[in-house]
Amino acid sequence: MSNTWARLIAQGVVLASVMGTMPAEAAAFAGGLKAGTLGLGGEIAVGLNNYLGVRASFNSFDYSDTREEDGIEYDGKLELKSFGAQLDLHPFKGNFYLTGGFFSNGNKLRLHASDPTGTEVYDIGDAEYRSDTSDPLNIKGALDFKSTVPYLGLGWGHAPVGESSLYFRFELGAYFQGAGKLALDASGSAVDENGDSFDVDGSSPEAQLFQANLEQERAETESDIGEFKIWPAIEFAIGYRF
């Protein structure tokens, strides 16, 4: 997080503290449903005054697709799961707001590749392999991120405070989950470029070379999917003011 963002947050906290001492109505409450790039979820919001509010929310969504990475076609499953708390600052007492907070991050990416027919060629590291039909090769991966992540954003819509019972909210932000760490494992038997079949978990020279190539594949794939380091947040919410 840049020093500029840090200064803005610090200034916002000071401003919110000053505003929080001003006379205000009783705290207002709201609850709603939301959808966006972090998943589907819900929120509870408390408006402390016309300048300051707090929110607690959760997000969840699973998405499956096929993706090729470094010569291997994976069946991928993206699991979005998070919950957290945010501080909303409305500097002009209106619908525009700045927000920041922290989330418990359960986002994961699952990868699986297998070919029981033995016809698909796997580019693993610096070598090519095929699956042994008598003991098919299976490659499984899991990409995990930081368990607690900061969030910064801005939006339009004051959930707890307003004239009507219903509220709408739109928000843009950044979810700083950091670079993912990829674990990649293989099981079964493979056939190398010489036509030799071997157990990938064994101790043969072919298996040892395969494991070295698999580690190279893991590092390259981990680098290739680095675009998940900062997850963009686009969110719409609708709810009810109590």
Image: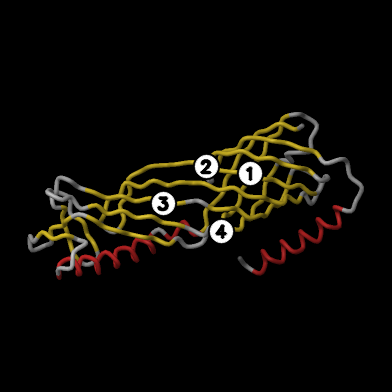
Classify 10 Å Cα crowding around label 1: few (below 14), some (14-19), many (20 and above).
some
Label drawn at residue 60: 2
Q: CA distance from mark 3 to mark 2?
A: 14 Å
Residue topped by disc 1: 57
Q: Residue at x 12, y 49 (%)?
A: 134
Above or below, 45 against 140 in this view is above
Residue topped by disc 3: 109
Q: CA distance from mark 3 to mark 4?
A: 16 Å
Q: Kindly identify the amino acid type of the residue bearing the numbered disc 2.
A: Ser
Above or below, 202 against 101 in this view is below
Q: Residue 193: where, in percent of width, then height?
A: 11, 62
In the rendered image, which quarter is residue 223 located in?
Answer: bottom left
* Mark 3 vs 1: CB contact within 8 A: no
Q: CA distance from mark 2 to mark 1?
A: 11 Å
Classify 10 Å Cα crowding around label 2: few (below 14), some (14-19), many (20 and above).
some
Q: Residue 190: where, in percent of width, then height?
A: 16, 57
Label drawn at residue 185: none
Residue topped by disc 4: 176
